[in-house]
Image (tube, helix red, strand yellow):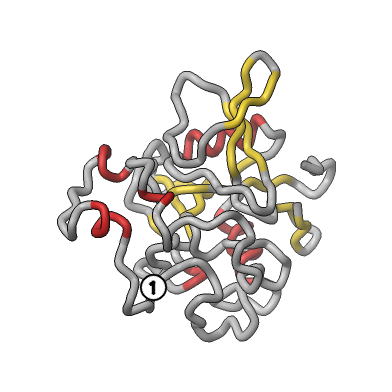
């Protein structure tokens, strides 16, 4: 974890999961929807494929099972923008740079994964949006930390792009909030660190949704 301004600690990488069975840990595929009947723990590791297909409620529980919690929106934004309050988490972060993070917002050659899988005519239902093939296609999800320039001032990787990240805050209408964009685009709902989606319930998840965990600075877990 990385301590931010003496205020809180945040995972350096987007979270993957392990399944907890009778106290033992078993691998869980990051390309599959977490089961409502299972118990998961968040894992924070460089080079691991982060968990998509996860709801805010599941992400929150996985953080708690690791002795942590979901980051607040304020914490997440502070880690992303750095002390200079930049829009993008890389050198020269006041201006967009294609390829610095894993996102294709302004890449004219990029074709989204749903269009590729469904011949340009995808349906946006739960079966389509939770298809495990999506995040395994080339040009989609990358292992955590694969973009070394996308670590911002504090060395917290992939806050922009790769996966959307759930935060703990709700909207006034009770919807969940996720931030940072994902591999397909990271500017539709605000550029870079300012990106935020508020259209979905906290129980929603699809191929694009991921998370990372935070703690207070005192007694922060070292895993």
Left or right, 25 with reference to 110: right
Residue 168 screen position, x and y as percent: 54, 45
Q: Give the camera-side residue of 202 and 146.
A: 146
Q: How many marks?
A: 1
Up the image or down, 178 lies above or below 126; here it is below
Q: Position of residue 127 (x, y in %)?
A: 26, 38
The residue lying toward the viewer, choosing from 201 and 41, is 41
Where in the figure is residue 200, as x and y percent of width and height?
A: 34, 46
User: Mark 1 — residue?
Assistant: 105
Q: Residue furthest top?
A: 22
Residue appearing at x 76%, y 57% in the figure: 2
Q: Residue furthest right?
A: 219
Structural crowding at the residue carrying mark 1, measured as other residues with C-alpha within 10 Å and reported as few (<14), some (14–19) or many (≥20): some
In the rendered structure, the answer to whether residue 80 lies left or right of residue 202 reads: right
Horizontally, is 15 left or right of 171 in the view?
Answer: right
Q: Position of residue 74 (x, y in %)?
A: 59, 59
Residue drawn at x 63%, y 32% as measured from the top left: 41
Q: Nearer the viewer, residue 65 or 7?
A: 65
Instruction: Residue lying at the far left in this picture: please name it.
Output: 121
Give the quarter of the figure containing the C terminus. top right
For residue 78, which quarter of the picture? bottom right
Q: Secondary structure at mark 1?
A: loop
Residue visible at 44% across and 36% down? 32
Residue at image coords 24%, 59%: 115
Up-down relation of residue 56 to residue 92 (above or below): above
Q: Quadrant of residue 89?
A: bottom right
């Amino acid at each position: 974890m990385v301590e931010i301004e003496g205020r809180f600690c945040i995972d350096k990488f987007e979270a993957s999961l392990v399944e907890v069975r009778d106290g033992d840990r078993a691998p869980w595929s990051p390309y599959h929807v977490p089961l409502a009947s299972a118990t998961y723990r968040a894992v924070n590791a460089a080079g691991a494929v982060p968990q998509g297909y996860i709801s805010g409620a599941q992400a929150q529980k996985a953080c708690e099972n690791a002795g942590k919690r979901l980051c607040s929106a304020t914490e997440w934004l502070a880690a992303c923008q750095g002390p200079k309050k930049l829009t993008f988490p890389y050198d020269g972060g006041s201006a967009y740079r294609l390829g610095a993070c894993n996102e294709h917002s302004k890449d004219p050659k990029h074709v989204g994964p749903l269009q590729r899988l469904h011949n340009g005519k995808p349906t946006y239902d739960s079966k389509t949006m939770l298809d495990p093939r999506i995040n395994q296609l080339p040009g989609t999800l990358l292992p955590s930390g694969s973009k070394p320039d996308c670590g911002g001032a504090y060395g917290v990787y992939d806050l922009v792009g790769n996966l959307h990240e759930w935060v703990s805050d709700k909207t006034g209408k009770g919807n969940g909030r996720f931030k940072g964009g994902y591999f397909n685009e990271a500017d539709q709902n605000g550029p870079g660190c300012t990106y935020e989606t508020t259209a979905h319930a906290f129980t929603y998840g699809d191929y694009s949704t991921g998370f990372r965990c935070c703690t207070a600075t005192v007694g922060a877990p070292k895993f």
